[in-house]
Image (cartoon, rainbow, N blue to C red):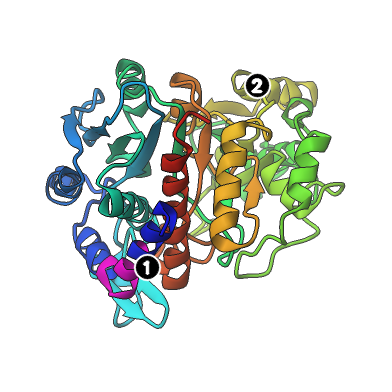
Amino acid sequence: MTLRDAALEHSARYFDRGQFQTDLARLVALPSESQNPHAPEHLQNYLDHCIIPMLGQMGFTCRVLTNPKRGAGPFLLAERIEAADGPTILTYGHGDVVRGQGDQWRDGLSPFELVKEGDRLYGRGSADNKGQHLINLMALASVLAVQDTLGFNFKILFEMGEEIGSPGLKEICATYKDQLAADVFIASDGPRVSPDNPTIFTGSRGGLNFDLVVNLRDEAHHSGNFGGLLADPAQILAHALSVIADPRGQIQVPEWRPTSLTPEIKKVLAALPPVDAGFPLDENWGEQTLTMAERVFGWNSFAVLAMKSGNPEAPVNAISGFAKASCQLRFVVGTDPDDILPALRRHLDGLGFAQVDVVQAEGNPFPATRLDMDHPWLSFVAASLETTCGVAPDLLPNLGGSLPNDCFADVLGLPTIWIPHSYAGCCQHAPNEHILEPLARQALTCMTGLFADIAQSGARI
């Protein structure tokens, strides 16, 4: 029996005997909510009581790193070095979760207790990201179980603050760049295109949040006495929004329309199945000349996240002096992040909207990243997943959402490959979060086969 076959058999037994469910239940039970300022001890406990003992049994040396950002969660750097000149893989996971929202889960479910119903395992972090990094670690453990060695070096970086914007991650990568050196970065987060088929993406769209503010006066004034005499900030703001995107959401700011949707990227996206969100999508929204896949994976999108003028809960007959829209641009490679807001300023000024202030929101924006589609590591990983599953994986140049991938692609200079183990309907960040058992089992075998293939390759790709 080959190493690959033996490792796959070991992973299948581990999952089918219920051990994956048991291990995931232990991880989910720890309420590691990074958004909760009253629970910092759980962030440390997740590393101390869940991850470090698991890695210790697998022969990893572990080192907890203090976050350079005051008050933010710790990091864990773990490594198993078998040969100084051998291939080295770096992976990543985050043990923090969003708030549990326990009062919003349906009857019979609780965020920090894993509950099995049918083929679903419910619990906060089951999909984002505890279940995903558990799959990868157990795939690695299967290779070790059958040959007592990996055949390559493996490094792991865990953070406990991804759900609050990964504070300190970029600084940690810069400070420990030599210790994190590797041949390739392979990790798991986000959803698959389809729950039945593996997905690979190599980067993510960037994200920049900003506010549009019209502040004309400190007080509101009677709409009968002053209607027609006082400018209405809400109307000014509404018209300003209308020149940023047209009635079907097509971006009107010239610099926000990317040039990186090349024929090569179009060809990759054309091979994807239809976007499956689990609910109806609006085919007539977004860039009219693009397919739906091109709109979310190859183009920029503008969104108004929230708007306010006056008191929406109790409106009165008065003209407000203030209006604000909280906005976001998701952007692909080829968009200059430093020019996003200056370009908007120029666009608004040119159309007579000098009264509209553009204010960048707090927090650092996520840059956009993407790997060359002909990179040899990408070809190797795709071939391995196809060998295991019998079908080619869905390939994305980048995720539609945002991840801190720039820390690994730009700071560490690594080719980055993400293999997500969830699906669009998993309810991550919402009540009733869950992971699908058939998907998780398939993902475990895919990762086991991939690590076995890397071990048997015997050299850098």
Marks 1 and 2 in Cβ contact (< 8 Å): no
| CA distance separating discs 1 and 2 | 46 Å
Q: Secondary structure at mark 2?
A: loop
Q: Identify which amino acid the numbered label 2 is placed on.
A: Asp
- Point out residue 351 in the picture as x, y percentages from the top left corner: 80, 26
- Point out residue 92 in the picture as x, y percentages from the top left corner: 36, 39
Start and end of the magenta stretch?
Answer: 11-20
Residue 434 can be seen in this image: yes
Q: Identify which amino acid the numbered label 1 is placed on.
A: Ala
Most foreground residue, 154 or 247: 154
- Point out residue 70 in the picture as x, y percentages from the top left corner: 21, 26
Residue drawn at x 30%, y 16% is 175
Q: Which residue is mark 2?
A: 336
Closer to the eye: label 1 or 2: 1
Mark 1 is surrounded, within 10 Å at the Cα level, by few (under 14), some (14 to 19) or many (20 or more) other residues, namely: some
Residue drawn at x 53%, y 58% is 315
Q: Look at the magenta stretch and give its main secondary structure.
A: helix
Q: Quadrant of residue 60?
A: top left
Quadrant location of the N terminus in the rendered image = bottom left
Q: Secondary structure at mark 1?
A: helix
Q: Which residue is mark 1?
A: 12
Most foreground residue, 368 or 365: 368
Q: Which comes before the other along the chain, label 1 or label 2?
A: 1
In the displayed structure, 312 sits above or below 234; it is: below
Q: Is residue 16 magenta?
A: yes
